[in-house]
Image (tube, grey):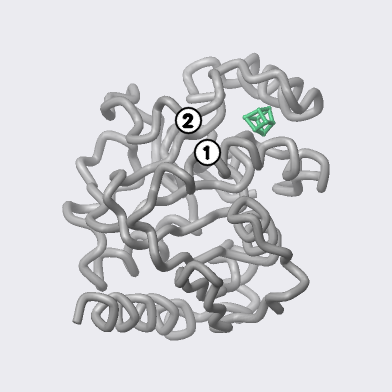
């Protein structure tokens, strides 16, 4: 698990999530193991977010980034995807570099950072023990992912972070994952014209082991913005 960035999180003050009508309730009971874990962490850290983590970004987003699930000291603590952990530092730096975020990322949900043209959605919205949701939990939470991709018609390029996100978002889009082989940088054009560009997850583990380097991660977003330019021309 990632360690907290710094200090005690400030109260969450960000506005209603952009896809509020498609989010699960704070006390979603559909995955008993995850609900029990959520309650246990809430008892331990009552000042944390401790709930399913809503999507971040706007409904007009052209780029969809699909994460796996909240990290304990990141999104589960702060209430904003990827905020407060090691994975978020690389992700938000990269989004800033490619003009997909404005403001300064300060690892807090109230740091004023805004996504521009991008949305971040987790395939599984609750914190899983050891960062590992079961296949059943991923399947159960897909109903929310499915509702959200349906609400984002402008989202023409998707970047799933890791194999589970790749499979789940393909299923959410009505596709059969085995037809699209996961690989870092692999590009898949779907029948409806959307394009998926796979990336290894920007987790601390992948970064520390060198499985994912900053240039490798940036190359995915460079390609996404290149595709966007072609779509606009
Ligand atoms: S992971 Fe999704 S479906 Fe499962 S309890 Fe959380 S919000 Fe509900």
* Residue 113, above or below 86: above
> Quick check: 184 left or right of 58?
right
Task: Using the image as rendered, state which of residue 21 and residue 165 is in the foreground.
Answer: 21
Residue that extends furthest to the front in the rendered view of this protein: 191
Task: Give me the disc on residue 157.
Answer: none
> Quick check: 205 left or right of 197?
right
Q: Name the residue under label 2.
A: 22
> Which percent across, then down, holds residue 58?
29, 45
Local crowd at mark 2 within 10 Å, few (<14), some, or many (≥20)? Answer: some
Task: Using the image as rendered, state which of residue 46 and residue 169 is in the foreground.
Answer: 169
* Residue 142, above or below 8: below
Q: Residue at x 61, y 16 (%)?
A: 27
> Quick check: 193 left or right of 113?
right
Q: Callout 2: helix, strand or loop?
A: helix
Q: Mark 1 points at which residue?
A: 147
> Which percent across, then down, holds residue 208?
60, 72
* Residue 119, above or below 53: below
Q: Which residue is drawn at 73% across and 75% down?
A: 179
* Residue 206, above or below 141: below
Mark 2 CB in 8 Å range of ligand 1? no
Q: Callout 1: helix, strand or loop?
A: helix
3D distance between C-alphas at marks 2 and 1: 6 Å
Task: Give yes or no for contact between labels 2 and 1 (Cβ–Cβ under 8 Å).
Answer: yes
Local crowd at mark 1 within 10 Å, few (<14), some, or many (≥20)? Answer: some
Task: Using the image as rendered, state which of residue 28 and residue 128 is in the foreground.
Answer: 28
> Which percent across, then down, holds residue 159?
49, 67
> Quick check: 62 left or right of 27?
left
Q: In which quarter of the image is the C terminus?
A: bottom left
Task: Using the image as rendered, state which of residue 210 and residue 80 is in the foreground.
Answer: 80
Q: Residue at x 77, y 71 (%)?
A: 178
């Amino acid at each position: 698990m990632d360690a907290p960035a710094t200090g005690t999180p400030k109260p969450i003050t960000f506005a209603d999530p952009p896809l509020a009508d498609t989010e699960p309730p704070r006390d979603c009971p559909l995955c008993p193991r995850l609900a029990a874990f959520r309650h246990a962490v809430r008892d331990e850290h009552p000042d944390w977010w401790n709930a399913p983590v809503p999507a971040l970004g706007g409904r007009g987003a052209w780029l969809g980034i699909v994460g796996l699930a909240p990290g304990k000291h990141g999104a589960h603590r702060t209430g904003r995807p990827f905020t407060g952990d090691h994975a978020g530092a690389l992700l938000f730096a990269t989004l800033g570099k490619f003009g997909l975020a404005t403001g300064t990322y300060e690892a807090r949900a109230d740091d004023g950072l805004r996504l521009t043209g991008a949305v971040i959605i987790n395939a599984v919205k609750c914190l899983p023990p050891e960062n590992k949701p079961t296949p059943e939990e991923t399947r159960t939470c897909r109903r929310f992912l499915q509702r959200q991709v349906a609400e984002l018609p402008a989202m023409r390029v998707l970047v799933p972070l890791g194999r589970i996100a790749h499979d789940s978002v393909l299923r959410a889009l009505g596709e059969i994952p085995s037809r699209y082989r996961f690989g870092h940088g692999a590009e898949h054009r779907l029948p409806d014209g959307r394009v998926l560009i796979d990336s290894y997850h920007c987790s601390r583990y992948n970064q520390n082991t060198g499985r994912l380097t900053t240039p490798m991660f940036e190359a995915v977003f460079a390609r996404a913005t290149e595709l966007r330019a072609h779509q606009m021309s």
